[in-house]
Image (tube, rainbow, N blue to C red):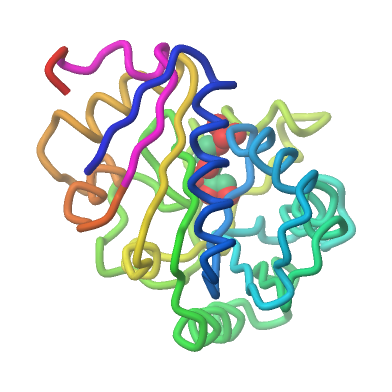
Amino acid sequence: MKVLRFANPEEATKAAFDIVSKRLEAGLKTIGLATGSTPLKLYEKLRNTNIDVSQVTTVNLDEYVGLEPADPQSYNYYMNEELFKYMNFAATYVPNGVAEDLEKECERYEGFLRNHPVDLQILGMGPNGHIGFNEPGTSFDSVTHIAELTPSTRDANKRFFDKEEEVPTRAITMGISSIMGAKEIMMLAFGEGKAEAVRTMIDAPVTVDCPATVLQNHSNAIVILDEAAASKLQRNK
Ligand code: F6R
């Protein structure tokens, strides 16, 4: 795992943008995308470029169960607003959180992933170490599935909703095995709230109790941190 530390989120985002744009220009076929606050500035930078993405397919990590794609809190909506409506991607895949048969939707999505192996997966992490919506305890063998969100994740995400009870309790998420199938992984983590999970991800043994530790087992993972998120790391890392 390669760890890059920057003074602030702006510089860290610039480094992430440089990597992503280089890969896109080099002909990357499929990029895996995350939602949340962390990649927002990265998406802003990307949508302001003229990079031709007409041959590029995107696959997103997850979607809340029960939210229509037109719902402003859905990840389908987020991706359209932040990126898709500005860029000419060949195809964009985000799970359908209102599919009639959610199990079938998971299988369908895993099928997309098999047909579109991810070249570069962008990840954020939860304060509890989740990746996608793979909460602590999720098997490293998991593929796309329905996840129950932990109270701490619902609490962390309530800032996007008017009322706490509106935060969905379940999500469709790529599994840990699906995520680890990417040829390259770029994890972004900013802010003090992530510092403990970042320390565990990098300095502690690999354990399902902190899903992000699985990245230690990936042969091509890069972690991009600001100083606050890196503040609990051992000095020599
Ligand atoms: C989002 C996702 C989540 C977030 C994580 C961090 O698609 O899969 O794992 O990356 O919850 O969220 P933020 O960036 O809002 O702190």
Q: Quadrant of residue 193?
A: top left
Q: Is residue 225 magenta?
A: yes
Above-or-below relation of 199 to 46: above
Residue 55 x %, y %: 67, 78
Q: Residue at x 38, y 54 (%)?
A: 185
Q: In which quarter of the image is residue 41?
A: top right
Near-viewer residue (44 or 234)? 44
Which quadrant, please, contains the C terminus?
top left
Q: How many labels does the image show?
A: 0
Q: Tell me if residue 161 can be seen.
A: yes
- Magenta span covers which residues? 222-234
Residue 91 x %, y %: 72, 77
Near-viewer residue (127 or 2)? 2
Above-or-below relation of 67 to 28: above
Q: Which residue is drawn at 40% across and 43% down?
A: 130
Residue 148 x %, y %: 50, 53
Q: Tell me if residue 154 can be seen.
A: no
Residue 88 x %, y %: 80, 68
Q: Residue at x 41, y 42 (%)?
A: 187
